[in-house]
Image: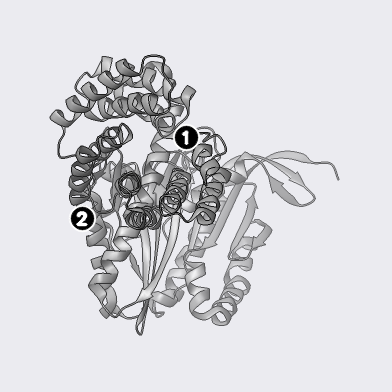
Amino acid sequence: MASTRRLAAIVAADVAGFSRLTEADEEGTLTRLRAIRAELLDPTIAAHNGRLVKTTGDGLLVEFSSVLDALRCATEVQASMAERNATVIADKRIEFRIGIHQGDIVVEDGDILGDGVNVSARLEGLAEPGGICVSARVQEDAAGKLDLAFEDIGEQALKNIARPVRAYRISAGPVPASAQTRPKQALPEKPSLAVLPFQNMSGDPEQEYFADGIVAELTAALSRVRDFFVIARNSAFSYKGRSVPLQLVSRELGVRYLIEGSVRKAGQRVRITAQLIDGASGNHLWADRYDGAVSDIFDLQDQITASIVGAIQPSVRSAEIERSRRKRPESLDAYDLVLRAYPNVWSLERTANAEALKLLYQAMAIEPVYPLAVSLAAWCHAQQVVYNWTAEPAKARTEGMRLAQSAAAESGEDPTILTVLAAAYSIVRSHNIAARLLERALALDLNSAWAWNRSGWLHAYLDKPDTSIDHFERALRLSPFDPMNFNAYIGIGGAHLVAGRCADAVLWIEKGLIDRPGATWAYRELTAA
């Protein structure tokens, strides 16, 4: 059948927290949802001249020829649902989020496609449970024609939509002062994070303290990571119990990344989930789940916090590097040049090393006293010496040590810089200095996967293979998705080689080379094994 185009008002809706509801009572939730569709949704859509295009499990897509009809239908549905939920306990309420946009659609075999459909679906994701979010085109057509108040929440970067879309929340009457949008905060230069209150999924209000404790511990641990700007717990907890779109939270707090999660405690077992989200787009960058016994609640909190911090660090670093790549060349500053250098610094490849040094010296030309740039350049020069990547090794060694000493003098209390300096010193066999630097780095940030990785290498150099393997394993536990993990695999292989366990050495080095075939330096140890 041929496709046709037309202008339409598109309503996208889904059930907020549907996974949680079905996990708690799948049969009961589906029965209640079917009743809502039969008794409320289908009749209301028909009464306002809408066409139900399709249902998608917990959601539905409806087409209207009139924006006013779409708004009347949506507001009537939400008002009726509020009445239905008045006598239902909060954990069992079925609440819809609704997004509305007016735009061009393609009609094909009864289905509708196109940018208009995509925008309405993304707007639905910005709506609060029980709420409605619309585009500026809908607001302009309806302003003054319906007794509705439109709360401007600004331009939104919607996933897979090329242009920003101005969005509005709807309320039946004036917007209360408590719902007014807070002023947008400027983003700090360094990666900025907020840990939002975790949801207590235990069904026991008494366990709220446990969920809050996890968030407090995680916030404190992240605050000790000097690479991050972390919003204080009290500010983040102002969102507790509220359903606010994450993109709006990001704007109001002035942070680039958000961490949210949930805690479920049953008997002597606990399950914690955590997600890292890009605030501007709402995209999930990383997620994981942690299960354990509650025999020692505080020890479990420490373990989970350490795991989350270790996993988040490389995810944030990767996201920052990608963000830097998207910036226009004329907007580059020293910080972005360092971000662009990062992948090349850590690749341990000759051409990448040269590119990293070029970018780092550009950064130092802009900001001469920049300890991170200086320390990374020192490590690059150390790599040139040990891997024979330069025709002038003495010159590279002298420059590397000059830069390392300069960075240490400027920033002796930054664990990231101390770790990089330790790498520079260990790679040119100044082991005693490297050991002191790593001890200090780990004292400042026990959750640094980088520091444990470099300590693994150092102890292999010092002929302490079992300690080396233990430290590499700590790095892998803290940062299971780090793109640098190939380096730890090869390091574990090297430690087995030092211990004379050649078969184990081969297995681990080959595992590292599967992840990073270009790490040609590893073939020296593989050949020996």
**Vertical side of 59 occupied by 27: above or below:** below
For residue 220, which numbered disc appears in the image?
2
Q: Element at badge 2?
A: helix
Q: Position of residue 444 (x, y in %)?
A: 18, 48
Q: CA distance from mark 1 to mark 2?
A: 34 Å
* Amino acid type of the residue that numbered disc 1 sits on in the rendered structure: Pro
Which of 177 and 468 lies nearest the eye of the viewer?
468
Image position of 223 (left or right of 125):
left
Which of 505 and 436 lies nearest the eye of the viewer?
505
Q: Element at badge 1?
A: loop
**Vertical side of 213 occupied by 122: above or below:** above
Q: Position of residue 344 (x, y in %)?
A: 43, 29
The residue lying at 31 percent from left, 78 percent from top is: 294
For residue 322, which numbered disc appears in the image?
none
Image position of 484 (left or right of 211):
right
Q: Position of residue 394 (x, y in %)?
A: 31, 17
Residue pushed farthest right?
1
Label located before the other in sequence (1 or 2): 1
Q: Nearer the viewer, mark 1 or mark 2?
A: 2
Any part of residue 241 in sight: no
Which of 3 and 406 lies nearest the eye of the viewer?
406
**Vertical side of 305 occupied by 112: above or below:** above
* Amino acid type of the residue that numbered disc 2 sits on in the rendered structure: Ala
